[in-house]
Image (cartoon, rainbow, N blue to C red):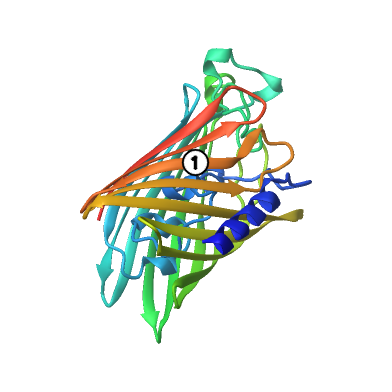
Amino acid sequence: MIRIAVLVSALAVICSTKLSAQTYHTLPRVLELPASTRAMALGGAYMTNSPQADVLFYNPALLVGVQSFGLDIQQWGTAGWTSTAVAARQWFGGAIGIGLQVLQYGAHGPGGYTAPSAWTTAPSGQTHLFDAGSLPVSERVATIGYAREIKGINLGLAIKLIEERVALNKFVASDARTRDGAVWFDAGISKNLGRFTTSLSYQNNGDRLFAGEYLGDYHVADRITLGVSSSGMQFGIFDYGITAAITQVRTFKEDSATIPAAGLEISYWPIRGRTFVARAGVQRTPYYEDASPFTFGFAYWGDNLVLEWSFQGMEQSELRTHRFGVSWR
Protein backbone atom coordinates (compact mmCIF):
# COMPACT_ATOMS: atom_id res chain seq x y z
CA MET A 1 0.00 0.00 0.00
CA ILE A 2 2.92 2.35 0.75
CA ARG A 3 4.34 1.75 -2.72
CA ILE A 4 0.95 2.53 -4.24
CA ALA A 5 0.70 5.77 -2.25
CA VAL A 6 4.16 6.85 -3.42
CA LEU A 7 3.30 6.03 -7.03
CA VAL A 8 0.00 7.91 -6.94
CA SER A 9 1.67 10.93 -5.29
CA ALA A 10 4.33 11.05 -8.00
CA LEU A 11 1.72 10.83 -10.72
CA ALA A 12 -0.28 13.59 -9.05
CA VAL A 13 2.70 15.92 -9.19
CA ILE A 14 3.33 15.13 -12.85
CA CYS A 15 -0.31 15.40 -13.91
CA SER A 16 -1.11 18.56 -11.96
CA THR A 17 1.36 20.65 -13.96
CA LYS A 18 -0.14 22.63 -16.83
CA LEU A 19 0.57 21.82 -20.45
CA SER A 20 2.49 24.56 -22.21
CA ALA A 21 0.59 23.85 -25.42
CA GLN A 22 -2.24 21.71 -26.65
CA THR A 23 -4.41 21.63 -29.73
CA TYR A 24 -8.01 22.72 -29.37
CA HIS A 25 -9.45 23.65 -32.77
CA THR A 26 -11.14 20.29 -33.12
CA LEU A 27 -14.57 18.82 -33.76
CA PRO A 28 -16.59 17.06 -32.51
CA ARG A 29 -15.92 18.39 -29.05
CA VAL A 30 -18.00 15.72 -27.33
CA LEU A 31 -15.14 13.28 -27.97
CA GLU A 32 -12.83 15.43 -25.83
CA LEU A 33 -15.13 15.25 -22.81
CA PRO A 34 -15.53 12.38 -20.32
CA ALA A 35 -17.69 9.55 -21.65
CA SER A 36 -17.92 7.82 -18.28
CA THR A 37 -18.74 9.00 -14.75
CA ARG A 38 -16.21 6.57 -13.35
CA ALA A 39 -13.47 7.71 -15.71
CA MET A 40 -14.14 11.38 -14.94
CA ALA A 41 -13.75 10.73 -11.19
CA LEU A 42 -10.46 8.94 -11.90
CA GLY A 43 -8.94 11.87 -13.78
CA GLY A 44 -9.85 10.48 -17.19
CA ALA A 45 -7.85 7.27 -16.64
CA TYR A 46 -10.41 4.58 -17.39
CA MET A 47 -10.38 1.33 -15.40
CA THR A 48 -9.22 -1.15 -18.03
CA ASN A 49 -10.81 -4.08 -16.16
CA SER A 50 -14.21 -2.39 -15.80
CA PRO A 51 -17.32 -4.57 -16.29
CA GLN A 52 -19.36 -1.59 -17.56
CA ALA A 53 -20.46 -1.02 -21.15
CA ASP A 54 -18.90 2.46 -21.43
CA VAL A 55 -15.56 0.74 -22.05
CA LEU A 56 -16.73 1.08 -25.67
CA PHE A 57 -15.86 4.79 -25.61
CA TYR A 58 -12.28 4.18 -24.46
CA ASN A 59 -11.12 0.92 -26.02
CA PRO A 60 -13.44 -1.47 -27.89
CA ALA A 61 -11.19 -4.43 -26.99
CA LEU A 62 -12.34 -4.08 -23.36
CA LEU A 63 -15.86 -5.19 -24.35
CA VAL A 64 -14.88 -8.85 -23.97
CA GLY A 65 -16.83 -10.29 -21.02
CA VAL A 66 -18.97 -7.15 -20.53
CA GLN A 67 -22.76 -7.32 -20.37
CA SER A 68 -24.47 -4.15 -19.09
CA PHE A 69 -26.45 -1.00 -19.92
CA GLY A 70 -25.73 2.54 -18.73
CA LEU A 71 -26.87 6.18 -18.85
CA ASP A 72 -24.83 9.30 -17.93
CA ILE A 73 -25.48 13.03 -17.93
CA GLN A 74 -23.22 16.04 -17.25
CA GLN A 75 -24.11 19.74 -17.25
CA TRP A 76 -22.36 23.13 -17.36
CA GLY A 77 -24.37 26.21 -16.46
CA THR A 78 -27.98 26.31 -17.62
CA ALA A 79 -27.80 25.17 -21.23
CA GLY A 80 -24.58 23.26 -21.90
CA TRP A 81 -24.89 19.52 -21.32
CA THR A 82 -23.72 16.15 -22.54
CA SER A 83 -25.19 12.68 -22.12
CA THR A 84 -24.34 9.11 -23.06
CA ALA A 85 -26.26 5.87 -23.44
CA VAL A 86 -24.49 2.58 -24.01
CA ALA A 87 -25.16 -1.16 -23.94
CA ALA A 88 -22.99 -4.24 -24.39
CA ARG A 89 -23.52 -8.00 -24.50
CA GLN A 90 -21.76 -11.16 -25.56
CA TRP A 91 -22.47 -12.05 -29.19
CA PHE A 92 -21.19 -14.56 -31.75
CA GLY A 93 -18.22 -15.70 -29.73
CA GLY A 94 -17.20 -12.16 -28.83
CA ALA A 95 -18.84 -8.99 -27.54
CA ILE A 96 -20.77 -6.15 -29.17
CA GLY A 97 -21.34 -2.64 -27.86
CA ILE A 98 -23.60 0.17 -29.06
CA GLY A 99 -23.40 3.71 -27.69
CA LEU A 100 -24.63 7.26 -28.27
CA GLN A 101 -22.98 10.50 -27.13
CA VAL A 102 -24.83 13.82 -27.37
CA LEU A 103 -23.54 17.34 -26.67
CA GLN A 104 -25.39 20.69 -26.73
CA TYR A 105 -23.52 23.98 -26.32
CA GLY A 106 -23.06 27.47 -27.76
CA ALA A 107 -20.48 28.93 -30.14
CA HIS A 108 -19.52 32.50 -31.10
CA GLY A 109 -21.84 34.01 -33.66
CA PRO A 110 -20.70 35.61 -36.92
CA GLY A 111 -19.19 39.06 -36.53
CA GLY A 112 -18.33 38.40 -32.90
CA TYR A 113 -21.97 38.44 -31.78
CA THR A 114 -22.21 37.70 -28.07
CA ALA A 115 -25.30 36.29 -26.46
CA PRO A 116 -26.86 37.54 -23.23
CA SER A 117 -25.36 35.92 -20.15
CA ALA A 118 -28.47 33.80 -19.67
CA TRP A 119 -27.67 32.05 -22.95
CA THR A 120 -24.05 31.40 -22.16
CA THR A 121 -23.47 27.68 -22.40
CA ALA A 122 -19.70 27.50 -22.17
CA PRO A 123 -18.57 25.88 -18.91
CA SER A 124 -15.92 27.99 -17.26
CA GLY A 125 -12.64 26.15 -17.37
CA GLN A 126 -13.49 24.38 -20.62
CA THR A 127 -12.87 27.33 -22.93
CA HIS A 128 -10.75 25.22 -25.25
CA LEU A 129 -13.90 23.18 -25.90
CA PHE A 130 -16.71 25.71 -25.59
CA ASP A 131 -16.98 29.31 -26.78
CA ALA A 132 -19.57 31.34 -24.91
CA GLY A 133 -21.86 32.73 -27.55
CA SER A 134 -25.16 32.76 -29.31
CA LEU A 135 -25.27 29.91 -31.79
CA PRO A 136 -26.72 26.59 -30.62
CA VAL A 137 -24.49 23.69 -31.58
CA SER A 138 -25.40 20.02 -31.28
CA GLU A 139 -23.19 16.99 -31.75
CA ARG A 140 -24.16 13.35 -31.96
CA VAL A 141 -21.80 10.39 -32.12
CA ALA A 142 -23.18 6.87 -32.55
CA THR A 143 -20.64 4.11 -31.92
CA ILE A 144 -20.82 0.39 -32.57
CA GLY A 145 -17.95 -1.89 -31.62
CA TYR A 146 -17.04 -5.55 -31.62
CA ALA A 147 -14.35 -7.37 -29.64
CA ARG A 148 -13.08 -10.90 -29.47
CA GLU A 149 -10.45 -12.82 -27.56
CA ILE A 150 -7.85 -14.51 -29.74
CA LYS A 151 -5.15 -16.60 -28.04
CA GLY A 152 -5.40 -14.71 -24.77
CA ILE A 153 -5.40 -11.25 -26.34
CA ASN A 154 -8.52 -9.10 -26.69
CA LEU A 155 -8.90 -7.28 -30.00
CA GLY A 156 -11.57 -4.69 -30.78
CA LEU A 157 -12.77 -2.39 -33.53
CA ALA A 158 -15.38 0.39 -33.42
CA ILE A 159 -17.07 2.59 -36.01
CA LYS A 160 -18.29 6.11 -35.15
CA LEU A 161 -21.02 7.89 -37.08
CA ILE A 162 -20.66 11.62 -36.36
CA GLU A 163 -23.08 14.49 -36.95
CA GLU A 164 -22.33 18.18 -36.29
CA ARG A 165 -25.07 20.85 -36.49
CA VAL A 166 -24.70 24.63 -36.10
CA ALA A 167 -27.93 26.64 -36.12
CA LEU A 168 -26.60 29.78 -37.82
CA ASN A 169 -30.06 30.55 -39.22
CA LYS A 170 -31.19 31.76 -35.80
CA PHE A 171 -29.23 35.01 -36.14
CA VAL A 172 -28.35 35.46 -39.82
CA ALA A 173 -29.97 34.59 -43.16
CA SER A 174 -32.70 31.99 -42.95
CA ASP A 175 -30.71 29.48 -44.98
CA ALA A 176 -27.43 30.03 -43.09
CA ARG A 177 -27.12 26.74 -41.33
CA THR A 178 -24.60 23.98 -41.51
CA ARG A 179 -24.61 20.27 -40.99
CA ASP A 180 -21.74 17.91 -41.53
CA GLY A 181 -21.03 14.27 -40.86
CA ALA A 182 -18.16 11.83 -40.89
CA VAL A 183 -17.28 8.20 -40.23
CA TRP A 184 -14.38 7.55 -37.86
CA PHE A 185 -12.74 4.37 -36.58
CA ASP A 186 -11.27 3.14 -33.30
CA ALA A 187 -9.12 0.08 -32.69
CA GLY A 188 -7.79 -1.45 -29.52
CA ILE A 189 -6.00 -4.30 -27.86
CA SER A 190 -5.87 -5.46 -24.24
CA LYS A 191 -4.37 -8.27 -22.21
CA ASN A 192 -4.37 -9.44 -18.61
CA LEU A 193 -0.91 -9.59 -17.06
CA GLY A 194 -1.29 -11.09 -13.61
CA ARG A 195 -3.38 -8.75 -11.50
CA PHE A 196 -3.03 -5.94 -14.04
CA THR A 197 -4.97 -5.30 -17.25
CA THR A 198 -3.10 -3.43 -19.96
CA SER A 199 -4.78 -1.56 -22.79
CA LEU A 200 -3.66 0.17 -25.98
CA SER A 201 -6.10 2.06 -28.20
CA TYR A 202 -6.08 4.29 -31.26
CA GLN A 203 -9.13 6.54 -31.62
CA ASN A 204 -10.70 9.04 -34.00
CA ASN A 205 -9.23 8.04 -37.33
CA GLY A 206 -11.19 9.84 -40.04
CA ASP A 207 -11.87 12.99 -42.06
CA ARG A 208 -12.21 16.51 -40.69
CA LEU A 209 -15.57 18.16 -40.02
CA PHE A 210 -16.59 21.48 -41.57
CA ALA A 211 -18.58 23.77 -39.25
CA GLY A 212 -19.78 26.16 -41.95
CA GLU A 213 -18.43 29.34 -43.51
CA TYR A 214 -18.79 31.27 -40.24
CA LEU A 215 -16.99 28.85 -37.95
CA GLY A 216 -14.57 27.36 -40.45
CA ASP A 217 -12.76 24.06 -40.80
CA TYR A 218 -11.75 22.08 -37.73
CA HIS A 219 -9.14 19.41 -37.17
CA VAL A 220 -9.38 15.78 -36.12
CA ALA A 221 -8.00 15.06 -32.65
CA ASP A 222 -6.87 11.47 -33.02
CA ARG A 223 -5.31 9.91 -29.97
CA ILE A 224 -3.26 6.95 -28.83
CA THR A 225 -3.75 5.82 -25.22
CA LEU A 226 -1.78 3.32 -23.16
CA GLY A 227 -3.48 2.33 -19.91
CA VAL A 228 -2.98 -0.10 -17.05
CA SER A 229 -5.27 -0.88 -14.13
CA SER A 230 -5.66 -3.24 -11.20
CA SER A 231 -8.47 -3.65 -8.70
CA GLY A 232 -9.63 -5.97 -5.94
CA MET A 233 -6.50 -5.47 -3.83
CA GLN A 234 -7.01 -5.43 -0.08
CA PHE A 235 -5.85 -3.07 2.66
CA GLY A 236 -7.44 -3.92 5.99
CA ILE A 237 -11.22 -3.81 5.65
CA PHE A 238 -10.98 -1.92 2.35
CA ASP A 239 -10.50 -2.97 -1.25
CA TYR A 240 -8.71 -0.61 -3.59
CA GLY A 241 -7.90 -0.23 -7.25
CA ILE A 242 -5.48 1.93 -9.21
CA THR A 243 -5.38 3.06 -12.81
CA ALA A 244 -3.03 5.12 -14.94
CA ALA A 245 -3.01 6.22 -18.56
CA ILE A 246 -0.95 8.31 -20.91
CA THR A 247 -2.52 9.75 -24.05
CA GLN A 248 -0.84 11.25 -27.08
CA VAL A 249 -3.25 13.66 -28.81
CA ARG A 250 -2.52 14.80 -32.37
CA THR A 251 -4.29 17.09 -34.82
CA PHE A 252 -3.74 17.90 -38.48
CA LYS A 253 -0.80 20.32 -38.99
CA GLU A 254 -0.56 21.05 -35.26
CA ASP A 255 1.71 19.96 -32.45
CA SER A 256 0.81 16.95 -30.37
CA ALA A 257 0.21 16.91 -26.63
CA THR A 258 0.96 14.24 -24.04
CA ILE A 259 -1.64 13.89 -21.27
CA PRO A 260 -0.86 11.66 -18.28
CA ALA A 261 -3.66 10.73 -15.88
CA ALA A 262 -4.09 8.55 -12.81
CA GLY A 263 -6.80 7.54 -10.38
CA LEU A 264 -7.44 5.65 -7.16
CA GLU A 265 -10.65 4.11 -5.84
CA ILE A 266 -11.28 2.66 -2.39
CA SER A 267 -14.30 0.47 -1.69
CA TYR A 268 -15.98 -0.85 1.44
CA TRP A 269 -18.69 -3.50 1.53
CA PRO A 270 -20.34 -3.96 4.94
CA ILE A 271 -22.78 -6.44 3.36
CA ARG A 272 -22.10 -8.68 0.39
CA GLY A 273 -23.63 -7.12 -2.71
CA ARG A 274 -23.66 -3.61 -1.15
CA THR A 275 -20.42 -1.76 -1.92
CA PHE A 276 -19.60 1.92 -1.37
CA VAL A 277 -16.76 3.43 -3.40
CA ALA A 278 -14.75 6.65 -3.09
CA ARG A 279 -12.67 7.86 -6.05
CA ALA A 280 -10.05 10.50 -6.78
CA GLY A 281 -8.06 11.31 -9.89
CA VAL A 282 -5.63 13.75 -11.45
CA GLN A 283 -5.03 14.72 -15.06
CA ARG A 284 -2.73 17.19 -16.77
CA THR A 285 -4.74 20.13 -18.15
CA PRO A 286 -3.83 22.82 -20.73
CA TYR A 287 -2.35 26.10 -19.55
CA TYR A 288 -5.33 28.05 -20.92
CA GLU A 289 -7.92 25.89 -19.18
CA ASP A 290 -9.51 26.92 -15.89
CA ALA A 291 -10.51 23.38 -14.94
CA SER A 292 -8.81 21.87 -11.93
CA PRO A 293 -6.60 18.86 -12.68
CA PHE A 294 -8.13 17.07 -9.68
CA THR A 295 -11.41 15.13 -9.79
CA PHE A 296 -13.46 13.23 -7.22
CA GLY A 297 -16.41 10.89 -7.10
CA PHE A 298 -18.49 8.32 -5.25
CA ALA A 299 -20.38 5.21 -6.29
CA TYR A 300 -22.73 2.56 -4.97
CA TRP A 301 -22.51 -0.95 -6.37
CA GLY A 302 -25.51 -3.21 -5.77
CA ASP A 303 -26.02 -6.73 -7.03
CA ASN A 304 -27.09 -5.48 -10.46
CA LEU A 305 -27.40 -1.69 -10.06
CA VAL A 306 -24.57 0.88 -10.08
CA LEU A 307 -25.08 4.55 -9.11
CA GLU A 308 -22.20 6.99 -9.71
CA TRP A 309 -21.32 10.67 -9.26
CA SER A 310 -18.21 12.64 -10.19
CA PHE A 311 -17.08 16.24 -9.71
CA GLN A 312 -14.56 18.67 -11.17
CA GLY A 313 -13.99 22.17 -9.88
CA MET A 314 -12.52 25.27 -11.51
CA GLU A 315 -9.36 27.01 -10.35
CA GLN A 316 -10.25 30.61 -11.23
CA SER A 317 -14.03 30.71 -10.93
CA GLU A 318 -16.82 29.53 -8.67
CA LEU A 319 -18.35 27.26 -11.30
CA ARG A 320 -18.06 23.49 -11.28
CA THR A 321 -19.38 20.51 -13.16
CA HIS A 322 -21.06 17.32 -11.96
CA ARG A 323 -21.70 14.07 -13.77
CA PHE A 324 -24.21 11.39 -12.79
CA GLY A 325 -24.44 7.83 -14.04
CA VAL A 326 -26.60 4.75 -13.57
CA SER A 327 -25.97 1.32 -15.03
CA TRP A 328 -27.29 -2.21 -14.85
CA ARG A 329 -25.10 -5.26 -15.15
- Residue 307 in sight: yes
Res 27 → quadrant: top right
Q: Give the residue at x 42% y 63%.
A: 231
Say which element carries label 1. Answer: strand
Nearer to the camera, 45 or 171:
45
Q: Give the residue at x 63% y 23%.
A: 317
Mark 1 nearby-residue class (10 Å; few <14, some 14–19, many ≥20): many
Q: Amino acid at mark 1?
A: Phe
Res 84 → quadrant: top left
Q: Check the picture and name the quadrant holding the C terminus.
A: bottom left
Residue 133 x %, y %: 61, 23
The residue wearing badge 1 is: 296
**Left or right, 181 with reference to 25:** left
Disc tally is 1
Up-down: is 328 above or below 247? Answer: above
Residue 130 x %, y %: 60, 33
**Left or right, 107 with reference to 30:** right
Res 29 → quadrant: top right
**Left or right, 219 with reference to 86:** right
Q: Give the residue at x 62% y 52%.
A: 208
Nearer to the camera, 280 or 237:
237
Residue 139 x %, y %: 48, 40
Q: Give the residue at x 69% y 50%.
A: 13
Residue 323 x %, y %: 43, 37
- Residue 221 in sight: no
